[in-house]
């Protein structure tokens, strides 16, 4: 069983040699996608399709749902993976918790079994509902509606049914006399999406919305191309030329690119704080989580590692060359670095560091500031120690002007 559009999508999105995990609930959408996969792979289906089912034990009819799931597993002799769980109030919103639970479950299977991608049965009606809700909530999505292929939690997700509506799926299942489980929770009218499911979309409205989605995604693609040309350091002048909505969208884009979650695709919480931080136009850093920070200089801003949580120590037992993620150093002429005995320990700057030699400026922080070391690099800056005393701090200008046989990779490490 399959329609031409879905068959074309399967041919375009899947490979004959691929191994796919199907998120299978026994509902009409996943049953239809399974039947399409049977038509696509034929008698080789069991080598390419695996089923994953999560029983949430969230209604009195879960046994009926599970019976449908096992009906298809046994019918087509497919390998399957099952998870049992139960919602508790402390988990928060049920839908958010259930989504996080099942995708974590899917990710583990894909990694363990070395599968190609996850297949989900989102269809055209889901796509239209998602878009309408995005507009209603004034979201700033990375993509309008639902993309055919995307990535989540380091796994590829493919949606082959976006060309067919819910009503068409019901019609084809009825024609083929296929059994499925209808989840009654989808009739809950307290949920915005289910209100949309009640009203539905006629052919003319669907066509109009699909054109609108296409246009908006083309505009988004052009916008992403524009901001990606900025590189990791975003020029503040370019940022100020954007409208406020574009500024917010840019922030949402870079926060997501850095794997920092922004709730419901809107600049709330972390995103809003970042926007306000840049709005103040103050140099400094804003800690985003334990490992990342937003850095703002006079002319640019970027997201990088939170340097105050970084540290390194390297020991030189004799005159030698070494390269590591933070620096490359030729110490075969140690006198260039005011070093006359070994071992030499090189570590990053620590708060309160002082130089033990007879320099007018003893405080390392003061010295680094005078040398105009960017504030975000100071926590990573190298200092040389002999017998636990700082004997040398390389001049930043000497390194930049290649007067010393030393290269710093501090910035690359910061944004890598």
Image (cartoon, helix red, strand yellow):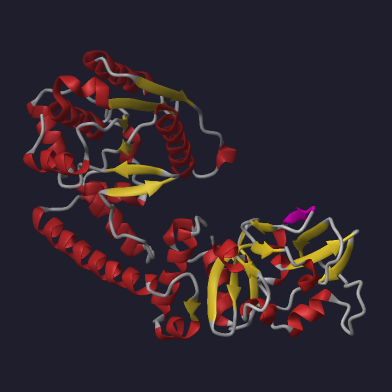
Say if the magenta span includes residue 91.
Answer: no
Is residue 33 rendered to the left or right of residue 8? right
Of 217 and 328, nearer the camera is: 328
Q: Quadrant of residue 269?
A: bottom right
Residue 409 visible somewhere in the drawing: yes
What residue is shown at x 81% (from left), y 80% (from top)? Answer: 366
Of 218 and 330, nearer the camera is: 330
Name the spot of residue 275 as percent of width and height, x first.
53, 74
What residue is shown at x 54% (from left), y 75% (from top)? Answer: 301
Of 319 and 268, nearer the camera is: 319
The vertical placement of 125 against 226, above or below, is: above
Residue 269 visible somewhere in the drawing: no
Q: Quadrant of the N terminus?
A: top left
Q: Quadrant of residue 64?
A: top left
What residue is shown at x 62% (from left), y 77% (from top)? Answer: 402
Of 89 and 218, nearer the camera is: 218
Name the spot of residue 9 as percent of width and height, x first.
16, 43
What residue is shown at x 31% (from left), y 25% (from top)? Answer: 50
Q: Quadrant of the C terminus?
A: bottom right
Name the spot of residue 364 as percent of width and height, x first.
82, 75
Name the spot of residue 49 as percent of width and height, x first.
27, 26
Q: Is the stretch drawn in magenta largely helix, strand or loop?
A: strand
Q: Which residues are magenta?
A: 312-317
Is residue 50 rendered to the left or right of residue 269? left
């Amino acid at each position: 069983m399959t329609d031409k559009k879905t068959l074309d999508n399967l041919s375009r999105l899947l490979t004959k040699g691929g191994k796919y995990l199907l998120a299978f609930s026994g509902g009409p959408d996943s049953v239809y996608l399974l039947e399409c996969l049977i038509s696509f792979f034929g008698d080789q289906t069991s080598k390419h399709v695996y089923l994953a089912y999560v029983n949430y034990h969230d209604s009195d009819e879960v046994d009926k749902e599970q019976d449908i799931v096992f009906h298809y597993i046994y019918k087509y002799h497919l390998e399957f993976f099952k998870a049992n769980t139960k919602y508790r109030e402390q988990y928060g919103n049920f839908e958010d918790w259930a989504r996080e639970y099942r995708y974590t479950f899917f990710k583990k299977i894909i990694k363990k079994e070395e599968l190609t991608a996850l297949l989900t049965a989102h269809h055209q009606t889901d796509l239209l509902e998602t878009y309408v809700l995005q507009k209603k909530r004034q979201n700033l999505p990375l993509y309008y509606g639902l993309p055919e292929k995307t990535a989540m939690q380091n796994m590829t997700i493919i949606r082959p049914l976006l060309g067919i509506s819910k009503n068409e799926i019901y019609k084809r299942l009825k024609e083929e006399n296929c059994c499925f489980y209808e989840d009654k929770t989808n009739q809950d009218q307290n949920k915005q999406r289910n209100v949309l499911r009640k009203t539905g979309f006629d052919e003319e409205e669907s066509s109009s919305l699909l054109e609108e989605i296409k246009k908006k995604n083309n505009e988004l693609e052009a916008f992403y191309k524009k901001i990606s040309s900025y590189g990791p350091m975003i020029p503040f002048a370019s940022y100020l030329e954007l409208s406020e909505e574009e500024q917010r969208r840019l922030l949402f884009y870079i926060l997501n690119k850095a794997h920092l979650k922004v709730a419901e695709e809107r600049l709330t919480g972390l995103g809003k704080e970042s926007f306000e931080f840049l709005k103040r136009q103050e140099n400094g850093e804003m800690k985003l989580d334990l490992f990342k920070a937003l850095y703002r200089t006079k002319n640019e801003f970027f997201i990088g590692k939170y340097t105050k949580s970084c540290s390194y120590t390297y020991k030189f037992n004799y005159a030698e060359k070494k390269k590591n993620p933070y620096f490359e150093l030729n110490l075969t002429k140690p006198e260039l670095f005011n070093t006359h005995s070994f071992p030499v320990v090189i570590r990053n700057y620590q708060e309160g560091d002082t130089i033990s030699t007879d320099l007018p400026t003893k405080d390392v922080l003061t010295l680094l500031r005078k040398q105009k070391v960017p504030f975000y690099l100071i926590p990573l800056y190298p200092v040389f120690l002999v017998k636990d005393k700082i004997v040398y701090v390389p001049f930043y200008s000497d390194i930049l002007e290649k007067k010393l046989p030393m290269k710093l990779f501090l910035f690359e490490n910061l944004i890598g």
